[in-house]
Amino acid sequence: MERICGNARQLAEALNSIDGIQVNYPLLEGSPDRELCMRQLRGFGGGILTFRTGSRERAFRILNSLTYAVIASNIGDVRTLAIHPDSTLYIRSTKEQKESAGVFDDTIRVSVGIENIDDLIADFSEAIRNS
């Protein structure tokens, strides 16, 4: 879990530095959950992050371009998993329910694994750049 949390934090920070990408991860600077996470979870922000891509089409192009991440709805795996929650997990939810859960049509959810973080950052960065 330490490796998963560390990888998630580094991936979130890397993605957050890319123009046009909006990342939700509790340890990012400016996150409303940062202080609570530092206090209650001793600085471990968990292994899940989401990011918004700007459009549903771009989200799918990014997902389809990933080479390390597996497209799957599971969480807590040693492999990095990515999914488009709007069209899968939340497909039967109302727009209001989705929005209250932070799910939009351009959202990608990532359950970060234990792969080499440099490989993960390169994979996601290249997929975003090529989208």
Image (cartoon, helix red, strand yellow):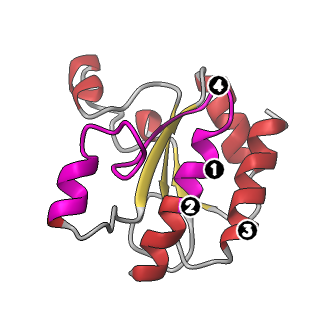
Residue depicted at 66% across the width and 36% down the height: 60
Distance CA(mark 1)–CA(mark 3): 10 Å
Residue 21 on image: x %, y %: 60, 31
Magenta residues (range):
10-39
**Residue placed under numbered mark 3 in the picture:** 118
SS for tag 3? helix
Residue 58 on image: x %, y %: 68, 28
Distance CA(mark 2)–CA(mark 1): 6 Å
**Residue placed under numbered mark 2 in the picture:** 10
The numbered mark, 1 or 3, whose residue comes first in the sequence reads: 1
Residue 117 on image: x %, y %: 66, 70
Is residue 26 a member of the stretch shown in magenta? yes
Residue 120 on image: x %, y %: 69, 64
What amino acid does circle 1 point to? Ala
The numbered mark, 1 or 4, whose residue comes first in the sequence reads: 1
**Residue placed under numbered mark 4 in the picture:** 20
